[in-house]
């Protein structure tokens, strides 16, 4: 899905469900964050292909949870972005929702033809099957995986990015947002609260938001120029790589600045962290005990039983 489509859907959802300008802007900004794992910036194209980081590193439930802790509305925007990308086909590599946990599973039980693969006695947990070459062969050139067969870790959808679906979401979201804005400006119905615009968009919100938005725009602008150069070379230019790091630093700085300028929000978020930590610890403990029990059993030797599949 294209950058404007993600942003416009975030703005439209923010307007429909919340109506406050600062929330609308935060959802829109959050909808840009998952694409920080694009196919340029940190790695050479060859390294990036081997690691398959795009639609994985920042397109997963763990990343969404981290962003949610920074700000729930940024988290909502990031989720909308990831959900849209999950509807695209293998051409754009789908979405690896359970990264990085899926990378801990090294093998699959079946190959892409459904034939049983030999099981490694040192591995107790498997994915169901290997990814279909007929899908990955259709992948965009910059994102195409290497020669090594990979377990099927990603989910795909029916929509080709940049095609009718992408355009439909963009123009539909834009029309809806502009309609709500027009009704609010004309006073027919306050879908978007414009009456307290100056009070809502105070400096403690505006300054971190502007800094963060500038970092995101710089990141994407530099990345687009770098991507065109990468189409001809496997090694990124140093200046683009440096600017990519600088832009990422600006985004992180905007988060810190927002926390410093809005201490009440930080206190409110921090008060819920012990409960969240307790829940994560309980889930991890149950998963650990379950896997220990399962891994103590011998691997099956017949086709009627399976090893642990995730």
Image: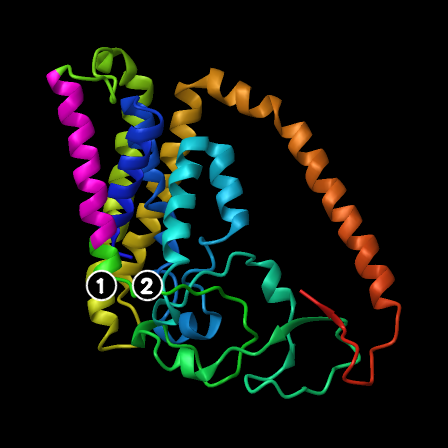
Camera sees residue 71: no
Residue segment shown in magenta: 168-186
User: Along the line of sight, which residue is nearer the eye, 38 or 236?
Assistant: 38
Report whether residue 122 is seen: yes
By what rule are the colours in the image chosen? rainbow
Q: CA distance from mark 2 to mark 1?
A: 8 Å
Coordinates of residue 264 in the picture (x, y in percent): 48, 15
Q: Height in image: 309 above or below 62?
A: below
From the viewer's perspective, tell me whether residue 304 is left or right of residue 24: right
Q: Position of residue 223 (x, y in %)?
A: 26, 58
Seen at 28% across and 33% down, the residue is 211
| Mark 2 lies on residue | 159
Q: Position of residue 17 (x, y in %)?
A: 35, 28
130 left or right, relative to 53: right
Q: Quadrant of residue 210?
A: top left
Query: Which image quadrant: the N terminus?
Result: bottom left
Q: Which residue is mark 1?
A: 163
Along the line of sight, which residue is nearer the eye, 273 or 117? 117
Quadrant housing residue 165: bottom left
Q: State yes or no: discs 2 and 1 in contact (Cβ < 8 Å).
A: yes
Question: Residue drawn at (58%, 24%), measured in percent from left and top?
Answer: 270
Label 1 residue SS:
loop
Q: Position of residue 100 (x, y in %)?
A: 57, 58
Residue found at x 54% / y 24%:
269
Q: Quadrant of residue 283?
A: top right
Looking at the magenta stretch, what is its main secondary structure? helix
How dense is the environment of label 2, judged by Cα within 10 Å: few (below 14), some, or many (20 and up)?
Answer: some
């Amino acid at each position: 899905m294209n950058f404007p489509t993600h942003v416009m859907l975030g703005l439209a959802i923010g307007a429909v469900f919340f109506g406050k300008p600062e929330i609308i802007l935060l959802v829109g900004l959050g909808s840009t964050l998952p694409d920080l794992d694009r196919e340029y910036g940190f790695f050479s194209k060859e390294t990036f292909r081997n690691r398959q980081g795009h639609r994985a590193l920042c397109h997963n439930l763990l990343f969404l949870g981290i962003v949610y802790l920074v700000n729930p509305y940024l988290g909502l925007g990031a989720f909308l972005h990831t959900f849209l990308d999950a509807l695209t086909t293998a051409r754009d590599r789908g979405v690896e929702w359970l990264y990085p946990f899926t990378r801990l599973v090294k093998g699959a039980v079946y190959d892409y033809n459904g034939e049983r693969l030999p099981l490694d006695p040192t591995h107790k947990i498997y994915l169901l099957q290997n990814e279909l070459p007929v899908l990955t062969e259709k992948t965009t050139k910059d994102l195409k995986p290497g020669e090594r067969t990979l377990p099927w870790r990603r989910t795909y959808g029916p929509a080709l990015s940049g095609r009718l679906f992408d355009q439909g979401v963009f123009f539909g979201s834009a029309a809806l947002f502009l309609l709500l804005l027009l009704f609010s400006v004309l006073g027919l119905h306050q879908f978007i609260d414009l009456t307290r615009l100056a009070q809502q968009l105070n400096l403690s919100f505006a300054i971190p938001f502007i800094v963060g938005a500038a970092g995101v725009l710089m990141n994407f602008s530099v990345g687009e120029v770098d991507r065109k150069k990468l189409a001809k070379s496997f090694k990124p230019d140093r200046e683009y790589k440096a600017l990519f790091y600088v832009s990422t630093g600006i985004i992180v700085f905007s988060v810190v600045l927002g926390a410093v300028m809005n201490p009440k929000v930080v206190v409110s978020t921090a008060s819920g962290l012990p409960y969240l930590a307790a829940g994560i610890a309980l889930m991890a403990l149950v998963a650990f005990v379950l896997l220990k029990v399962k891994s103590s059993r011998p691997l099956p030797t017949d086709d009627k039983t399976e090893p642990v599949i995730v």
